[in-house]
Image (cartoon, rainbow, N blue to C red):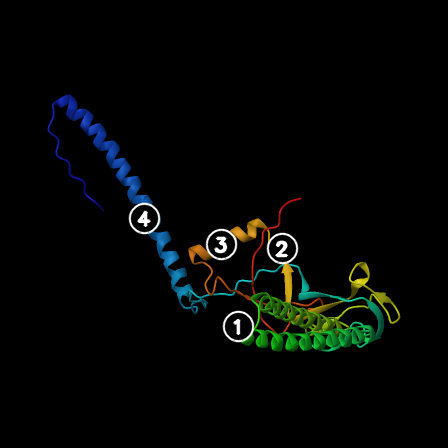
Amino acid sequence: MSTVKMEIRSSACDLKNAFGWLHASAMAIKIAVVLATCVAHTGCEKKGQGQAASDAPPPKVEYITVMPSTIPIQYEFVGMTEPSKVIEIRARVSGFLIARGFEEGKSIVAGDPLFQIDPRPYEANLEIVRSRQDQAKSRLLLAQLEADRFAEAAAKGAAAQRELDRTQTELAEAKSSVRLADANVAKAELDLSYTEIKSPVTGVIGRTLQYEGSYLDAGPQSMLAEAMQIDPIYVVFAISERDWLKWRDDVASGTILGDKDNPPVKVKLLDGTTYCETGKMTFLARVPIR
């Protein structure tokens, strides 16, 4: 039981009012005491229940430790493979096609014979120009001997200056004739070498556009086939502007780590397998909107 003592300093009227307030306050205190008793009683019951619950084993709590780490980021695009080189095999001299040295669609090696144009006209022409070359060299030798004799005679006063000038002029013409003959021989040898067409690259040869017996020239009928170099091979794919800007921003902010100038590229084939070799980005070109 609690005792409440209050000190009041006021007039009689105020004191009467104070007693009324005191009575009301005592009633409130009494009610509060009853409520406190009820709460205390209820708390005892809950305490008993809590004690029973405390006897049960604590629940198992699972947790994970969060640690910063790097994870691979993959961008997937649909691309197409292309040969690194596409060479048009063309005839550089005219003539009849007499042989083909490959099978369409098969592998080829640089230097392999592909086509053979009839070489006989070019062999004959080479013999002609070589003969003219020999004649020019003979005339040059004669002109040189004559020029030397007249030069020696002119030094002794036994030859006129006019004759000396003539021999010197003939010597210069003979030298020019030899150079012209040499050039004709070189051109004839080159034309003869063009009759045997060899592969310029290692790769794959396409289908034949001209067959044995066809007449070839250096114009519209010169196209024979296409040779493709596939080592290395190109993979061409398109990137949207949004993906490109995100890639650039992530690299600038450090979100993407590694070699930003040469990220590794893997190719997944249509059957779901991944190609064994890792590629590298060679260049980026903007495609204009048409």
Label 3: element kind: helix
Q: CA distance from mark 1 to mark 4?
A: 160 Å
Tell me, yes or no, whether the two marked residues, 1 and 3, touch with CB atoms within 8 Å. Answer: no
> Which is nearer the eye, 74 or 107?
107
Tell me, yes or no, whether the two marked residues, 2 and 4, touch with CB atoms within 8 Å. Answer: no
Q: Name the residue that disc number 4 marks.
A: 37
Return the disc, 4 or 3, that comes first in the chain's sequence: 4
Q: CA distance from mark 1 to mark 3?
A: 90 Å
**10 Å neighbourhood of mark 1: few (<14), some, or many (≥20)?**
few
Q: CA distance from mark 3 to mark 2?
A: 16 Å
Identify the disc placed on residue 157.
1
> Which is nearer the eye, 113 or 70?
113
**10 Å neighbourhood of mark 2: few (<14), some, or many (≥20)?**
few
Identify the disc placed on residue 212.
none
Tell me, yes or no, whether the two marked residues, 4 and 3, touch with CB atoms within 8 Å. Answer: no
Q: Residue drawn at (76%, 75%), measured in percent from left and top?
A: 126
Q: Name the residue that disc number 3 marks.
A: 248
Residue type of the residue flagged with mark 4: Thr
Return the disc, 1 or 2, that comes first in the chain's sequence: 1
Q: Residue drawn at (28%, 44%), measured in percent from left and top?
A: 33
Tell me, yes or no, whether the two marked residues, 1 and 4, touch with CB atoms within 8 Å. Answer: no
Label 2: element kind: loop
Tell me, yes or no, whether the two marked residues, 1 and 2, touch with CB atoms within 8 Å. Answer: no
Residue type of the residue flagged with mark 3: Arg
Please identify the quarter of the rendering in which residue 21 is found: top left
Q: CA distance from mark 1 to mark 2?
A: 87 Å
Residue type of the residue flagged with mark 2: Ala
Tell me where residue 212 appears, x and y as whole percent.
87, 72
Residue found farthest to the front: 158
Q: Is residue 270 left or right of residue 175?
A: right
